[in-house]
Image (cartoon, coloured by chain):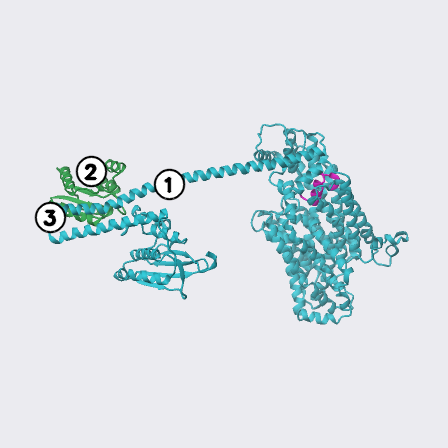
Amino acid sequence: MKKILIVDDEPNIVMSLEYTFKKNNFEVFIARDGQEALEILNKQFPDVIILDVMMPMVDGFATLEQIKKDERLQHCKVIFLSAKNKEKDIEKGLSLGANLYVTKPFSIKKLVEQVQELIQ
Amino acid sequence: MSSIGLLLILTLYVSILFYIAHWAEKRSNSKWTTNPYIYSFSLAVYCTAWTYYGSIGVAAQSGLSYLPIYLGPIIIIPTWMIILKRIIRISRVNKISSIADFISLRYGNSRFLGALVTLICIFGVLPYIALQLKSISDTFNIVTNTQSSSNIFSDTTTYVCLALALFASYYGTKYVDASEKRRGIVTAVAMESILKLIFFLIIGIYVTYFVFDGFDDIYAKAVLLDSFDKKNTIGGLTEGINWFFLCVLSMFAIFLLPRQFHTAIVENNKETHIRTAIWLFPLYLLLFNIFVFPIAWGGNILFEGQGLNADTYSLLIPQFFNNNTLTVLVFLGGFSAAISMIIVSSISLSTMLSNNLLIPYGFVGSLENTSQEKNNKRILNSRKIAIFSLIILAYFIYRFFVLDYSLVSIGLVSFVVIAQLAPAFFGALFWKRGSKKGAITGIVLGFLVCFYTLLLPYAIGITSSSSAFLQEGPWAIELLKPFHLFGLDYLEPIQNAFFWSMLLNTMSYLAVSVSFKGNYRERNYAEMFVDIDKYITNHENAFVWKGTAYISDIKKVLQRFLGEDRTKRALNIFNLKYNIDKNITTADARFIKFAENLLTGHIGTASAKILISSVIKEDKISLPEVLRILEESKENIIINKKLTDTSNELKKISDQLKHANQELIKKDIQKDEFLDTVTHELRTPITAIRAATEILHDDDDEIPNELRKQFLKSIISESDRLNRLIDKILDLEKFETGKHKIYLSKNNISKTIKNTIDSVRQLINNKNIAIIFNEASEEIKAFYDEERIIQVIHNLVSNAIKFCPETNGEITITVTENNKDVAVRIHNNGKGIKVEEFEPIFDKFYQSRNQNVKKPVGSGLGLAICKQIIEHHKGSIWVESTEGNGATFIFTLPNYNTTENQ
């Protein structure tokens, strides 16, 4: 079973993502901000991480930087999921090493496809 | 008390003073030595032994007549704010170190006038110093119960005199530059002023309350004395006129006495110190005079008919009661008064003697030496010798002339002599037409009158009315009777001399000045003195001079007195000040004036001019030309000022434009940021709705019922959130663009708060928060739009609830009112807000943009809207907090109940 970590501070969005990925046979972990995510990543090494950008305490960009430093997480695919849809935000996200930058609002169906594509 | 004992005490006392002087000299820049109080107390050098003992003598013999000497200064001191400030400014820029410098510089830097003023001062002050010595000697004899000795070597005053001469010549000539401040001397003098006042008050209290039973008791007993009525009756118009002249005389003295000029002007560090002096110094004089009358009449009562010298009552009374300590204290007070006067006077006289008499008349030639050290040593030595010889000279005057006179009479003679400088001095300050010839004529004639009517009778020792010279006048010419000149018979000798000498002096000064114009140099300095405020920052500009001069020649002269380093530094400062190229070889007028100033402190104004003139070639210049140049320089100053004003104005406008531009750029960035944030905030609920809807749409059949309900619920709440957000954005936009109107009506603020609290009661109860609402004791009404203010209070209370801790949350609301406004304070006991967030917290979306706080449960626009609402009410809103102690949001509304805001 593939593992996925969802990091977002909007409970209703998390609820939809959790439902969908569970339905698609993922083991789902949830974090409400970057800090929580990094705590989980100390013990779990998911295949995919979905990261919001604007979060309290540690934002998405900073979280990714931390992830990239961790040897054990080199295989992780990272997808940014953000309402920040400006050219420069997308560029920044990708340059930090994200595999994908998906802007909000998004199609859940399409997101699942993209995730599956990434891990094959 | 034995002579040896008293001498030991004296030695100890003087050593302490030496130590203070030494200590202060080392701390010349500390606030202990350069403060307005030291300055004010040093002015009290005015109160000499004559004040200390003589006032009592006068009060005992002729009632209130001792007062005018203090009334005069007290009346004139308020004008110091203007006059003294002006004198200080003139003296500072011209490096003036004595009254002789001051007067001679104004009248065309006249060598002769400087010497004349010096002579007048010496004539006036030496007997006065002698008088101080006499008081020391007299009182010493009283305290030790000895007779005054006819042998110079067994007279203690001889040794006191020598010690003083050494002290003054050592501390008074620390610097070659006489305009330098002598902190040591000044601090010691200030200390002595404090001590003499304290000792005098102690004896006053002793006599009034211990010997007698208060003022009333003394009065009751004094009334019974035969002479009381006669001595204490104010004698109508004639005595009024006598009083008037004494007041005027002492008004002049407070400006003109060399020691006053020295402490008030040469030793002034800051103009602002005058502000303290104008209340403290009169207060000092007042305190000094409180007990004069009680002591005098207490003495009269105790020693009636014994024919004792009333001047010494303050010593005789404690001695009479065998109070040795007090006798010695009083003696030390009088001693302080005497030596302060002697030291300061001899320093200022010696400066005059060397800078205005010895150096310009002869010495200047011997200063041709190229070695700075030798020249300076010579100058200092000349001053040391001058101080020494002046004090010794005073000593001989004391030994041979003044032994027989009372303290007051000699003091007043001194005042009258010094007063001869008044017309020239005050003319220098206020009248541009005053000329050198006028000043000289006035001073000489005034002095001659003074000599005839006062000095002569005193010098030949005939003040008793039995003398034929006084009774009938010389050669029996009635009109020439010295004490009743020209038949004026109701003035007392001092007033008579003062009146006639001053009349003749002033008249001739005015008449000669008007008839014979001064030369261009006089006119030039007149301009600089009278209009000092205009030239204060660059007075060298006002100096008119034409001719050829080379900087290198002048530099050589300067080096002879200042040394190479100081000359170089001074030149650099000058070049910097006037923005002059240092390669220029010819000197202009400004440079010549600057060089003269540099030398003035060392050798006086006249010699400075002589030395500088010897190396430059001056062209003749006519008076009209001087006036024209002065006029031009005045115009230049005005034009310059206008130009600077305009350029300043332009700079201000350009600054404003720059500021406005920056403001616009900032606004633009803010707008972009705002839009970014708004779209982000809008997209978030849309994202949630879209995701939930997509799930419901795609796998409608598979979703468990409960989960489906949850998705539907999330769609509803996110839609509401979206709607609220849009509402708030529009709300805010309308406030910002002024489309929202505020409808003011008179409301009860407490009621409004109560209603609002009720609407959030559920939330408060859920979190178990205690809400404390301190209503004002009286009903407070204010004008506001109730709906909007409810919105504000609701928002602030909701925030408070959010930030309250999970347990023991507490919200306190208070309402207060003052003349200006009504204030509502909403306090929560949460963790508080950082100082740097006090302002941005009211920005739109501040919380959601700030990554350091938990995402708000709200729009992030609440406080921004509150701010808009309150500002539309012309009130203000802010937050106060100390971290850990919760936060208080405060808003105020103008109080329209008071007239102030209507």
Residue A42, visible in the rendered structure: no
Amino acid type at mark 2: Leu
Do marks 2 and 1 both belong to one polypeptide chain? no
Q: Depth-wise, is mark 1 or mark 3 nearer the camera?
A: 3
Labelled disc at residue B666 = 1
Q: Which mark is residue A100?
A: 2
> Considering the numbered disc 1 on the image, is that residue within a helix, a strand or a loop?
helix
Read off the chain for label 3.
B
How far apart are the alpha carbons under marks 2 and 1? 34 Å
Q: Nearer the viewer, residue B157 or B129?
A: B129
- Name the chief secondary structure element in magenta: helix
Circles 2 and 3 on the same chain: no
Q: Which residues are magenta?
A: B96-113
Specify whether residue B101 is painted magenta: yes
The colour with which the image depicts chain A is green
Check the residue under mark 1 and report the chain it is in.
B
Q: Amino acid at mark 1?
A: Lys
Q: Report, in whole angstroms, how far the alpha carbon at label 2 lies from the one at label 3.
A: 29 Å
Location of residue B360 (image quadrant): top right
